[in-house]
Image: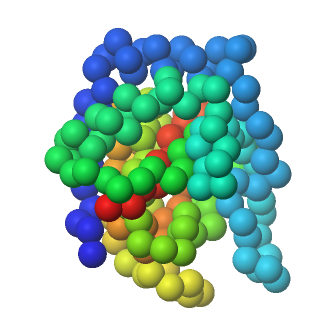
Amino acid sequence: MFETKELFGVVPTETHTELVNLITSLEFPWYYLEDTTYERAGKKSRPTPAFAHLLLSNEGHRSPFLDRFTPVYQGIIDQLDIQPRKVFRMRLGMLMNTRYVTPNEPYSFNTPHIDADFPHLTACYHFWHSDGRTTIFNETEETDKFTVHKNFEADINSAVVFDGKRYHASTCPKIHTKRAVLTINFTL
């Protein structure tokens, strides 16, 4: 199993600034999702509204903005010193601090999930510091009780890369207003 790694300074500062300016501009198209992850049928829970932009999908979708984000992918594989076989999905996600009714409500992660049901790696790139964590679990099968492998708080221009067989989940921020992540899935 691929060892989970945290990377810092993924892209040069100038590139990072350009990407942050792009995704926070009025020109960038974000699409509303009623729930950021697919809830398990019959499970009682509160949905997490979010915004997303699919840059690349395994089904052939290619956003006109894709090339602007390829330096992030390149920075990740350069730091890992690996040669992936194929990038099959790149997705931007924006979570807002709307999940918590009161500030003293405890943090709760969104639905644990995997991004594909075949061997792959998952990279989560964080654009800025936010109190919304990325949680990676020990489990590689769906269960009613997940145990935490590692937690990563979103930090500026950082990424966490882990084995895509591991279930993982995002957490909405509570203190900060938003959390933006670029998720990249690729095979070795």
Q: Residue at x 45, y 50 (%)?
A: 87
Which quarter of the image is occupied by the C terminus?
Answer: bottom left
Query: Position of 154 compared to 177: left or right?
Result: left
Residue 55 at x, y percent in the picture: 60, 38
Query: Position of 81 compared to 136: left or right?
Result: left
Which quarter of the image is occupied by the N terminus?
Answer: bottom left
Residue extending furthest left?
Answer: 81
Query: Position of 90 compared to 70: left or right?
Result: right
As drawn, 15 above or below 154: above
Residue 125 at x, y percent in the picture: 42, 41
Q: Residue at x 37, y 29 (%)?
A: 71
As drawn, 132 above or below 144: above
Q: Residue at x 27, y 62 (%)?
A: 4
Q: Residue at x 78, y 63 (%)?
A: 46
Residue 16: name its quadrant. Answer: top left
Q: Nearer the viewer, residue 24 or 89?
A: 89
As drawn, 176 above or below 15: below
Residue 103: name its quadrant. Answer: top right
